[in-house]
Image (cartoon, helix red, strand yellow):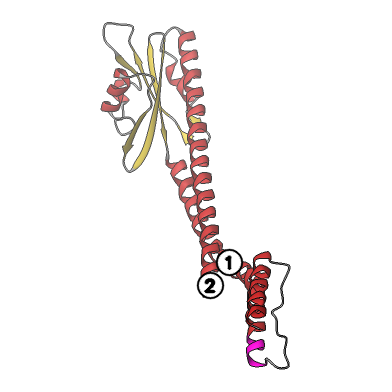
Amino acid sequence: KIRVRTAILIALSLMLTLSLFFAITFFSIRSSLIARSESEAMEQLRSVLTELNAQKDATALEQIVSRHAVTGESRLVYVILDRSHDSVRLIYPAAESFNPSAIPRNIIQQMITAPRETILYSLDGSDFQLYSLVSGPYIAGVAVNMIFIEEAEDSMVHAFAYSLLLGLFIAVACGFLVANFTLSPLASLVAAARSITHDASDGPSRLPEPTNVAEIGELASAINLLLEARD
């Protein structure tokens, strides 16, 4: 029936609009979280380099890094290289305490080759972003575990899925309500036509011409003109 088709069309339109809204919201929030994470990590990295350059040596490096080890919900992992000599050498973490499970050596090599570029890598099932800066004789990088963003994404996806399911029922209900409201004058017109057919002698000989829906009124008027012409 046209009523069902109209309801389905309205429901699909509402669902498409809702899905588009959720998609835009999801990517907007995700971009905002990543941008905030990068901004906070870079701010801490700049502070480390500023203090390190002010010290003129690396003797207090451990204390400097420990003061900037956490931002928001993430623990930061630093790697600092000194290029003041003929070769680039690792000064933090110390070579004897270097843990490749935090920042792999191949990632450090990429940082040396392309400083200031963001490096994405995965380690032990977690995704990391490494941001790096060059300041004076130092190349410094800070790695951020992106798990909090992944958790936020999962929460948003679940919330959106439940909202879409609820929105589906609401869209179908609204579709049928709108279809009934829109097509009710047509149903009245059909009922009037049937009454003329079944009781032509006593009932009205013309269809009512509703004014609340212009198209239905025009249809009724055209049918009445046809009936007059036949008479």
Whole-angstrom CA distance, mark 1 to mark 2, is: 12 Å
Where's residue 44, x and y in %?
A: 50, 23
Where's residue 83, x and y in %?
A: 32, 10
Give 93 or 220, whichever is nearer the viewer.
220
Which residue is at 46% across, 41% downward? 149
Q: Amino acid at mark 2?
A: Ile
Residue 75 visible in the shown view: yes
Number of dots carrying numbers: 2
Q: Is residue 44 left or right of residue 196?
A: left
Give 225 or 127, whichever is nearer the viewer.
225
Q: Is residue 44 left or right of residue 92?
A: right
Q: Could you tell me which secondary element the residue under label 1 belongs to? A: helix
Give 201 or 163, whichever is nearer the viewer.
201
Secondary structure mostly taken by the magenta-highlighted segment of the chain: helix
Q: Quadrant of the C terminus?
A: bottom right
Residue 67, above or below 182: above
Range of magenta residues: 194-199
Which disc number belongs to residue 2?
A: 2
Q: Is residue 228 left or right of residue 175?
A: right
Which residue is at 72% across, 72% downward? 210
Q: Amino acid at mark 1?
A: Gly
Q: Residues within 10 Å of mark 1 (few under 14, many from 20)?
A: many
Q: Say which quarter of the image contains residue 121.
A: top left
Q: Which residue is mark 1?
A: 175
Q: Could you tell me which secondary element the residue under label 2 belongs to? A: helix
